[in-house]
Amino acid sequence: MGRVTRSEVEHLAMLSRLELSEKEKVMYESNLADILEHAQKLSNNKELDNVEPMTNVLGLTNVFRKDEPKKEFSKQELLKNAPDSDGEGFRVPKVVE
Amino acid sequence: MLDIRNLTVKKAKELLDKKEIEPKDLVDASYARIGAVDDKIEAFNTVLSIEEINTQLNKISDGALYGIPYSLKDNICTKDILTTCSSKILYNYKPPFDATVEIKLKNAGGIMMGKTNMDEFAMGSSNENSAFKNTKNPWDLSRVPGGSSGGPAASVASGEVLFALGSDTGGSIREPAALCGIVGLKPTYGLVSRYGLIAFGSSLDQIGPLTKTVEDSAIVLGEITGHDQRDSTSATAEKIDYTKCLSGDIKGKKIAMPRQFFAKDLNAEIKESIMAAIRKLESMGAIVEEVDVSFVDYVVSTYYIISSAEAASNLARFDGVRYGLRANDTNGLVDMYIKTRSEGFGKEVKRRIMLGNYVLSSGYYDAYYLKALKARTVIKNEFEQIFKNYDVIVSPTYISTAFEFGAKSASPMEMYLSDIYTVPVNIAGLPAISIPCGLDKQGLPIGMQLIGKPFGETDILNIAHAYEIESGNGNVMPFVEGVDR
């Protein structure tokens, strides 16, 4: 590991919804390889194998509340930033071919 | 006109109390200073108009920050005011709401002067990743102000505002504070509500103050803490007046000095300066002892894996549908997503999204992401062990003083490795402060970091304040080239 192939970079770009130029592909191949190379000290660290993973430091638990609708914003306020809208909702390009 | 360059929040409050000045005097001085220096410093993405500022002035009547001008990092949402994250993808975004911190500052009587520049989506340590402009270091205009809160830090150091709020995911308040010679505080995870902070790494992000003195930091922090129903990760800690903990007495305080933070890659002048500061703390009665930490070889990787994984997920929301940029001439929905994101995100943001999706994808999840979460447990536990015997931990804030534009941009890995002293703090959710501890031979500021136990802001503020008073390093502000000299 520590090497990233061209097809992996292309697959990642697809997952990330990004389109990369040839130049960018070359750059990210090399950048990701550098980063993953450095990360070998982490991924090869056997002492960490039996440790419990931690996702948050405060030891938080789920916060539950009643699912009650509130009106905090008007439709107009929320549509104001939309690149395209018909005044009632967000307008997007055709979804189903 | 009132000279704002060396004015602090504390001093301004005293002048207001004695009725020697009015809020309008402070705001006029801030506005004039922005007009005089910001074409050189370029700290601001958006400066509010006189009308917008007067509207605020007309609304305030009292409060702990009555009439105090400040700036907000451009990833903190402000109602009907541009909030861009210094990204092309949000170039025109005007949020329909205020972040909780902005509501709190307004309620305390503060006056928001504008929104300050940053590395795009807070990803970077030099501010060079802004899609809009390069903010300059007020100490030397050919050097970076640090990042990602470079704009907020420069706006304070150049005297444009009396304080700023930034955000810190891996050092983004402390590092620019160090490079600009001011005080930067990253609070305990959960102490300050993140509602309205555009998310980068949700388990790491915290909002905190950038100020000229430790006392100002204590004043501002006290106004922005508190549980918020809108942020389920915000803590239910009791409200504290942090100015009351600044006793100046640090006799018997136990300070740990991790050996490994003083060995690797540390610039000799910085080491010397921090060691001198440590001797000063000892002379004031603190007990400083060396300790060991085991994680230095993998802590930077742990940070970049966790933060990039969270960023890849958080930044999926930028799709050209509800706000911001939408690319033209696209063919169907998915093509619209792809073209919008490719046009809208800069190269560092794309790099982090790709890295995040790599470590989360099947086949690599266990080796990288899960491993990083396990390392997080170890790092947090090691800090906990140290805090059983010590009140605070001391280290440098950054491996160098302010560097020249372009000096590190060729190697992302080199830039990442420089974050070694700041990232462990976010991984463990701890509070930490960077304070000035002198200048190097080139006259550039050096920062010292004090790390506290969870909700131990009182300890780090007290020790930092005592050191600041004793050393005389507080509120030493630069003369901006072409304006003050």
Image: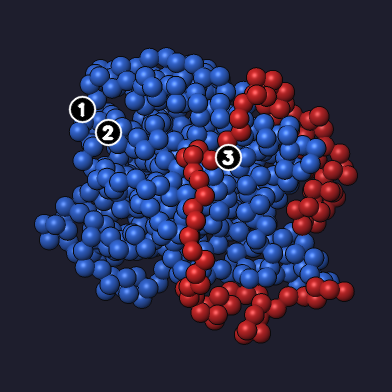
Q: Secondary structure at mark 3?
A: loop
Numbered label attached to residue B462:
2
Q: Are marks 2 and 3 on the same chain?
A: no
User: Quadrant of the image for the N terminus of chain A?
Assistant: top right
Residue drawn where x is 23% and y is 37% of the image: B245
**Residue picked out by circle 3:** A55
- Find the distance from the CA under tag 1 to the CA under tag 3: 37 Å
Chain letter of disc 2 in the image: B
Q: Residue at x 68, y 61 (%)?
A: B344
**Chain of the residue that carries numbered disc 3 in the rendered image:** A
- Disc 2 to disc 1, C-alpha distance: 8 Å
Tell me if residue B337 can be seen.
yes
Instruction: Where is residue B39? Give x, y as percent.
Output: 47, 59
Q: Residues within 10 Å of mark 1 (few under 14, many from 20)?
A: some
Letter of the chain shown blue in the rendering: B
At mark 1, the secondary structure is loop
Q: Is residue B157 left or right of residue B81?
A: left
**In the image, B221: left or right of B336?**
left
Residue B4 spot, x, y in % from top left: 28, 54
**Which numbered circle lies on residue B249?**
1
Specify the amino acid type for callout 2: Asn
Q: Amino acid at mark 3?
A: Thr
